[in-house]
Amino acid sequence: MRRSTASATTVVALLTLVLATETPRAADWPQWRGPARDGKSPETGLLRTWPEGGPPLAWKMSGLGTGFSSVAVVGERIYTMGDFEDGQYAEALAKDGSAVVWKTRIGSAWRDEYLGPRGTPSVADGRVYVLGTDGSLACLDAKTGSSVWQKHLPEAFRGFVMKAGGETDWKFSESPLVDGNRVIVTPGAKDAALVALDAATGKEIWRTTLPDLGAKGVDGAGYSSPVVSNAGGRRQYVQLLGRGVVGVDAATGRFLWGYNRIANAVANISTPLIDGDRVFASTAYGGGSALVEIRAGDEKLTAREVFFLGPDVLQNHHGGMILHEGHVYTGDGQNKGLPVAVELATGKLAWGPIRNAGKASAAISYADSRLYLRYQNGLVLLVEATPEAYREHGSFEIPGVTKPSWAHPVISGGKLYLREQDVLYCYDVAGKT
């Protein structure tokens, strides 16, 4: 009898561990830019001010390969991507940084000056979805890393990424969006701009055919990732492409609206922000920023421009943006990342741009009324998320920065995760009681 009880207890414990490993929880960061794809962690009780030299380092782990991928944190696992000599891999790590649990090749490594993957894995229903730089989309078992299904966007959908000057592209950089029983990715082709695939099987559900969006920008996928919106009373996916921002019907993939003015012809990157019926987007390379309001129509929706800010006023490169209590916080300027706070309703600057000790682009995340700014030179700043004034609450430098430090910060379970090429740093940012 005792043996039976012990065995049952062991089985329950193992099942609990498996579920915790595979199923996103409240404190998890299961995809690009967090639970809601807005760059915000729902956690509270974190350090309000960092000590001299920054928060304590909990652990670090090396051997993860090169690249600029951020991380997803679900249960007892951390998921990321990296380039190695023999290919590009998706990886699962123990949450304490003690081991690589599995490592699965998904495609060819990218060997150039800006080598390595940029996408962040998406974790849902016991599966991990990743998109490699060569367009290899893989669905993997979250527990074992074994392949469930795989697609190659250039082959399956004639997909391609926008090319600067008609020649240069920085390859696929998207983080797949999992929405219920489907996964959404952006091949970028005219007749397959976005596609929806069955999350369990990879079978095609729909594809989006694009009309002419306008003269600005160039054809192809951008370097952004799609988000969900219910603007104009229609559930839709909003994405930034080579020709601008679009919204497509979630059920059918039908094109609903487009906005071309924001596009540039080099690289459209930052994930758009969603606020009810409004969409805010920003690009560098002479692009600018815009707020559009999506209005219902009989068949399609319309995108009404609320305001447009030229690149001399506001342009975000690739560090992303945070919307918090009616204000957009971001880094302004191409390769500058100068912090600004902008009132969403009007486009008026509340403060900034600020010249601080950071250099070049700044990746931004949010948690517990604080902005986490990570600069290209490895400087990390804690800044108060308030329109009143720019206020720093601590800083530190990531060790060993030799290439551009671009991976977006992740805040999960009282920890700050910073991927730095081959190394993942984990800092303890939980408040002390």
Image: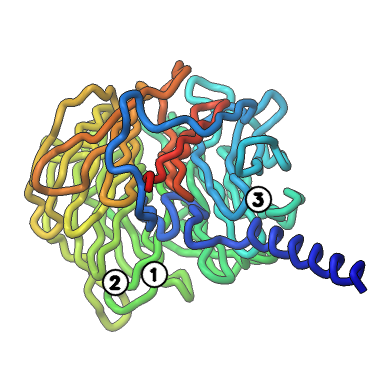
Q: Distance between the residues labelled 1 and 2?
A: 8 Å
Nearer the N terminus, badge 1 or badge 2?
Answer: 2
- State the mark number for residue 236: 1
* Residue shown at 36% from the left, 47% from the top: 46
Mark 3 neighbour class, 10 Å CA radius: few under 14, some 14 to 19, many 20 or more? many
Amino acid type, callout 2: Ala
Based on the displayed image, in which of its 4 quarters is residue 200 positioned?
bottom right
Residue 97 badge? none
Please tell me which residue lies in front, 225 or 52. Answer: 52
Residue where numbered disc 3 is placed: 138
Q: Is residue 278 left or right of residue 141?
A: left
Quarter of the view holding residue 406 = top left
- Residue at the spot 56% in from the left edge and 62% down from the top edge: 183
Q: Which residue is drawn at 53% across and 30% down?
A: 67
Tell me if residue 191 can be seen: no
User: The residue under label 3 is which amino acid type?
Assistant: Ala
Residue 328 coordinates in the image, percent (x, y) = 20, 50
Q: Where is residue 127 in the image (x, y as percent from the top left)?
A: 65, 58
Mark 2 secondary-structure assignment: helix
Check the image and name the residue furthest to the bottom. Answer: 298
- Residue 38 drawn at (x, y percent): 35, 55
